Image (cartoon, rainbow, N blue to C red):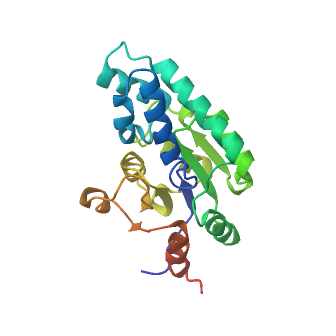
Amino acid sequence: MSGLSLQGVVFDVDGVLFDTERLTNQTWLAVGTEMGWPQIGEHYLEFVGQNRTDAFQRMTDLFGPEFPREEFMRRCSGQNQARMEREGVPMKPGVVELLDFLKDQKIPMALATSTGRERTLRRMEMTGLGPYFSAIITGDQVVHSKPDPEIYQLACRALGTDPAQTIAIEDSRNGILSAHTAGMKVIMVPDMIPPTPELDALLFQRCASLLEVRDFLSPQLNLE
């Protein structure tokens, strides 16, 4: 299909722009073991795409009210950020190439991440990616996180785009359900969560990398 009418692109962050899901999974396993709750690390993928409020509720559902949610998240967040401050934020291959391509085509871009605003802005500062984005919607701005469509609805509203003519780039089941329910076209770039027939049925396209996303979009936009 050619001649795609594309008004905007909204990116998930962790697992799409940044190769941070593996880092966070490692941290959850280590901190959970240190605190005597090794099972929390085994459930990490269930939490991908959730904001703090929904993650806390899920922890209570899984492990009961005695699970030390605040302390666990405080330790994990602190260790993750300290590691990135030391080593830098690991970026996925093709991030800058895809963002430059969309910028050159004058296609507005936004972020829709379940991470909080302070940490998100710090990572944008550390990587220099902030100026690419017209809007940044974070997990502390919504009542319900992915798979609820609220965060993607807010992102499209902030861009002033029609969801049906806006692409979401996602890696997780929660994120794909969120964007699809918001009425968007979804491109999946798998990270830790593998594609399934259920997810494939919801996708506009599945790409192996962000560079493949660029190469997929170029002919759709009637470009050489």
Above/below status of 61 relative to 29: above
Query: Residue 94 appears at what percent x and percent y?
Result: 60, 67
Residue placed at 45% from the left, 60% from the top? Answer: 164
Which quadrant would the C terminus be assigned to in this image?
bottom right
Query: Residue 99 appears at what percent x and percent y?
Result: 64, 64
| Front-most of residues 111 and 58 | 58
Query: Residue 28 appears at what percent x and percent y?
Result: 46, 34
Q: From this viewpoint, which residue is outermost toward the left?
A: 197
Above/below status of 189 relative to 123: below
Q: From this viewpoint, which residue is outermost toward the top?
A: 66
Above/below status of 63 relative to 114: above
Residue placed at 46% from the left, 41% from the top? Answer: 25
Residue placed at 38% from the left, 23% from the top? Answer: 37
| Front-most of residues 118 and 19 | 19
| Front-most of residues 72 and 139 | 72
Residue placed at 47% from the left, 33% from the top? Answer: 30
Above/below status of 182 relative to 25: below
Query: Residue 133 appears at what percent x and percent y?
Result: 67, 53
Which quadrant would the N terminus be assigned to in this image?
bottom left
15 displayed left or right of 37: right
